[in-house]
Image (cartoon, helix red, strand yellow):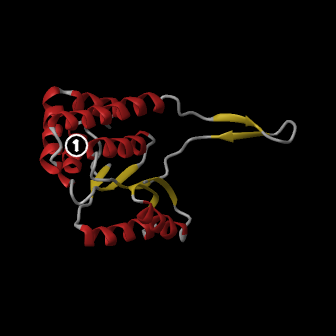
Protein backbone atom coordinates (compact mmCIF):
# COMPACT_ATOMS: atom_id res chain seq x y z
CA UNK A 1 0.00 0.00 0.00
CA UNK A 2 1.12 3.54 -0.65
CA UNK A 3 2.08 5.96 2.08
CA UNK A 4 1.42 9.61 2.73
CA UNK A 5 5.17 10.24 2.50
CA UNK A 6 5.12 8.50 -0.91
CA UNK A 7 2.24 10.74 -1.96
CA UNK A 8 4.12 13.79 -0.69
CA UNK A 9 7.18 12.82 -2.77
CA UNK A 10 5.05 12.41 -5.92
CA UNK A 11 3.34 15.79 -5.44
CA UNK A 12 6.66 17.49 -4.72
CA UNK A 13 8.11 16.44 -8.06
CA UNK A 14 8.54 19.60 -10.07
CA UNK A 15 6.37 18.55 -13.00
CA UNK A 16 3.56 17.39 -10.71
CA UNK A 17 3.58 20.67 -8.77
CA UNK A 18 3.60 22.53 -12.08
CA UNK A 19 0.70 20.46 -13.42
CA UNK A 20 -1.43 20.84 -10.27
CA UNK A 21 -0.79 24.59 -10.21
CA UNK A 22 -1.73 24.86 -13.90
CA UNK A 23 -4.98 22.92 -13.35
CA UNK A 24 -5.80 25.16 -10.39
CA UNK A 25 -5.19 28.28 -12.48
CA UNK A 26 -7.26 26.97 -15.39
CA UNK A 27 -10.19 26.04 -13.16
CA UNK A 28 -10.18 29.11 -10.91
CA UNK A 29 -8.44 31.81 -12.87
CA UNK A 30 -5.98 32.28 -10.00
CA UNK A 31 -2.61 33.76 -10.86
CA UNK A 32 -0.11 30.93 -11.27
CA UNK A 33 1.92 32.14 -8.28
CA UNK A 34 -1.15 31.72 -6.03
CA UNK A 35 -1.79 28.29 -7.49
CA UNK A 36 1.77 27.24 -6.61
CA UNK A 37 1.11 28.53 -3.09
CA UNK A 38 -1.99 26.34 -2.70
CA UNK A 39 -0.05 23.30 -3.96
CA UNK A 40 2.79 24.00 -1.50
CA UNK A 41 0.24 24.49 1.28
CA UNK A 42 -1.29 21.12 0.41
CA UNK A 43 2.14 19.47 0.54
CA UNK A 44 2.63 20.93 4.02
CA UNK A 45 -0.49 19.07 5.19
CA UNK A 46 0.87 15.81 3.81
CA UNK A 47 4.17 16.43 5.63
CA UNK A 48 2.34 17.07 8.90
CA UNK A 49 0.10 14.00 8.63
CA UNK A 50 3.07 11.84 7.66
CA UNK A 51 4.79 12.83 10.90
CA UNK A 52 1.63 12.74 13.00
CA UNK A 53 0.68 9.21 11.99
CA UNK A 54 3.88 7.96 13.64
CA UNK A 55 2.56 9.36 16.92
CA UNK A 56 -0.76 7.47 16.81
CA UNK A 57 -0.50 4.86 19.52
CA UNK A 58 -2.52 3.74 22.50
CA UNK A 59 -2.37 5.67 25.73
CA UNK A 60 -3.21 4.84 29.30
CA UNK A 61 -5.02 7.73 30.95
CA UNK A 62 -5.55 7.99 34.70
CA UNK A 63 -9.24 7.80 35.65
CA UNK A 64 -11.00 9.95 38.22
CA UNK A 65 -11.33 6.96 40.55
CA UNK A 66 -8.15 5.86 42.31
CA UNK A 67 -6.27 3.05 40.64
CA UNK A 68 -8.58 2.75 37.61
CA UNK A 69 -7.04 3.41 34.21
CA UNK A 70 -8.60 4.18 30.85
CA UNK A 71 -6.97 2.59 27.79
CA UNK A 72 -7.29 4.61 24.60
CA UNK A 73 -6.43 3.30 21.14
CA UNK A 74 -6.69 5.00 17.76
CA UNK A 75 -8.67 3.09 15.15
CA UNK A 76 -9.84 3.98 11.64
CA UNK A 77 -13.47 5.05 11.36
CA UNK A 78 -14.05 3.47 7.94
CA UNK A 79 -15.42 5.57 5.10
CA UNK A 80 -14.93 9.32 5.45
CA UNK A 81 -16.92 11.65 3.19
CA UNK A 82 -15.26 14.97 2.44
CA UNK A 83 -16.71 18.07 0.78
CA UNK A 84 -14.21 20.74 -0.24
CA UNK A 85 -14.55 24.39 -1.28
CA UNK A 86 -13.58 25.96 -4.59
CA UNK A 87 -11.20 28.66 -3.37
CA UNK A 88 -8.14 26.56 -2.48
CA UNK A 89 -8.90 23.15 -3.93
CA UNK A 90 -5.52 21.43 -3.88
CA UNK A 91 -4.73 22.42 -0.29
CA UNK A 92 -8.19 21.64 1.07
CA UNK A 93 -8.36 18.29 -0.72
CA UNK A 94 -4.93 17.22 0.54
CA UNK A 95 -5.81 18.44 4.02
CA UNK A 96 -8.97 16.32 4.29
CA UNK A 97 -7.76 13.32 2.31
CA UNK A 98 -4.31 13.23 3.95
CA UNK A 99 -5.80 13.19 7.45
CA UNK A 100 -8.36 10.50 6.72
CA UNK A 101 -6.12 8.16 4.75
CA UNK A 102 -3.20 8.56 7.20
CA UNK A 103 -5.51 7.29 9.93
CA UNK A 104 -6.43 4.23 7.84
CA UNK A 105 -9.75 5.35 6.38
CA UNK A 106 -11.01 5.42 2.81
CA UNK A 107 -12.42 8.64 1.39
CA UNK A 108 -15.29 9.66 -0.84
CA UNK A 109 -14.47 13.21 -1.92
CA UNK A 110 -16.99 15.62 -3.37
CA UNK A 111 -15.09 18.66 -4.68
CA UNK A 112 -16.74 21.97 -5.39
CA UNK A 113 -18.51 21.98 -8.78
CA UNK A 114 -16.06 24.66 -9.93
CA UNK A 115 -12.92 22.59 -9.29
CA UNK A 116 -13.43 18.92 -10.18
CA UNK A 117 -10.22 18.59 -12.19
CA UNK A 118 -7.98 19.36 -9.21
CA UNK A 119 -9.65 16.50 -7.31
CA UNK A 120 -9.42 14.10 -10.25
CA UNK A 121 -5.72 14.94 -10.73
CA UNK A 122 -5.02 14.26 -7.04
CA UNK A 123 -6.88 10.93 -7.26
CA UNK A 124 -4.67 9.98 -10.22
CA UNK A 125 -1.59 10.79 -8.11
CA UNK A 126 -2.84 8.48 -5.34
CA UNK A 127 -3.08 5.71 -7.94
CA UNK A 128 0.56 6.36 -8.92
CA UNK A 129 1.79 5.66 -5.37
CA UNK A 130 0.05 2.29 -5.21
CA UNK A 131 -2.87 2.99 -2.92
CA UNK A 132 -5.41 0.20 -3.23
CA UNK A 133 -8.29 0.86 -5.59
CA UNK A 134 -11.12 2.54 -3.70
CA UNK A 135 -8.90 4.33 -1.17
CA UNK A 136 -9.77 7.72 -2.68
CA UNK A 137 -13.02 8.06 -4.60
CA UNK A 138 -14.20 11.22 -6.35
CA UNK A 139 -17.85 12.15 -6.88
CA UNK A 140 -18.50 15.25 -8.97
CA UNK A 141 -21.64 17.14 -9.82
CA UNK A 142 -23.12 20.56 -10.46
CA UNK A 143 -24.93 22.61 -7.81
CA UNK A 144 -28.16 20.60 -8.16
CA UNK A 145 -26.35 17.25 -7.94
CA UNK A 146 -24.34 18.56 -4.96
CA UNK A 147 -27.50 18.56 -2.85
CA UNK A 148 -28.21 14.92 -3.72
CA UNK A 149 -24.58 13.91 -3.14
CA UNK A 150 -24.49 15.67 0.24
CA UNK A 151 -27.76 13.99 1.24
CA UNK A 152 -26.33 10.57 0.32
CA UNK A 153 -23.17 11.26 2.32
CA UNK A 154 -25.25 12.23 5.37
CA UNK A 155 -27.63 9.28 5.24
CA UNK A 156 -25.57 6.40 3.83
CA UNK A 157 -24.74 4.08 6.75
CA UNK A 158 -21.39 3.11 5.19
CA UNK A 159 -20.14 6.69 5.64
CA UNK A 160 -18.97 7.05 9.24
CA UNK A 161 -17.66 10.63 9.20
CA UNK A 162 -18.39 13.76 7.16
CA UNK A 163 -15.81 16.54 6.81
CA UNK A 164 -17.01 19.82 5.28
CA UNK A 165 -15.43 23.18 4.57
CA UNK A 166 -17.77 25.91 3.37
CA UNK A 167 -20.64 28.14 4.36
CA UNK A 168 -22.20 28.11 7.81
CA UNK A 169 -25.68 27.64 6.31
CA UNK A 170 -24.68 24.46 4.46
CA UNK A 171 -22.65 23.25 7.45
CA UNK A 172 -25.70 23.57 9.72
CA UNK A 173 -27.80 21.57 7.27
CA UNK A 174 -25.17 18.82 6.91
CA UNK A 175 -24.62 18.65 10.66
CA UNK A 176 -28.38 18.36 11.32
CA UNK A 177 -28.73 15.54 8.78
CA UNK A 178 -25.69 13.67 10.11
CA UNK A 179 -27.00 14.02 13.68
CA UNK A 180 -30.01 11.89 12.72
CA UNK A 181 -27.57 8.96 12.44
CA UNK A 182 -25.10 10.08 15.14
CA UNK A 183 -22.54 10.42 12.36
CA UNK A 184 -19.31 12.20 13.29
CA UNK A 185 -18.61 15.50 11.56
CA UNK A 186 -15.76 17.96 11.15
CA UNK A 187 -16.79 21.44 10.06
CA UNK A 188 -14.75 24.45 9.00
CA UNK A 189 -17.37 27.13 8.42
CA UNK A 190 -17.24 30.73 7.30
In the picture of the structure, the residue carrying the numbered disc 1 is: 127
The quarter of the rendered structure image containing the N terminus is: top left
Rendered position, 125 above or below 136: above
Rendered position, 143 above or below 31: below
Residue appearing at x 37%, y 29% in the figure: 47
> Residue 115's spot in the image, x, y percent?
21, 53
Residue at far right of view: 66
> Residue 152's spot in the image, x, y percent?
37, 70
Whether residue 172 sits left or right of residue 131 in the image: it is: right
> Residue 73's spot in the image, x, y percent?
60, 40
Q: Residues within 10 Å of mark 1 (few under 14, many from 20)?
A: some
The answer to whether residue 158 is seen in the rendering is no
The quarter of the rendered structure image containing the C terminus is: bottom left
Residue appearing at x 56%, y 41% in the figure: 74
> Residue 68's spot in the image, x, y percent?
82, 39
Rendered position, 121 above or below 167: above
Rendered position, 41 above or below 184: above
Whether residue 115 sits left or right of residue 161 in the image: it is: left
- The residue closer to the viewer here, 128 or 85, is 85
Residue appearing at x 14%, y 33% in the figure: 18
- The residue closer to the viewer here, 183 or 26, is 26
Amino acid sequence: MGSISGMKRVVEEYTIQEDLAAICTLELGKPIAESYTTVDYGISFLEWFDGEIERLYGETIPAARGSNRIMMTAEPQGVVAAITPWNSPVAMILRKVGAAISAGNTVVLKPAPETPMCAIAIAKLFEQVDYPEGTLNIVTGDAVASVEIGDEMCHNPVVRHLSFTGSTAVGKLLNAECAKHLKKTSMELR
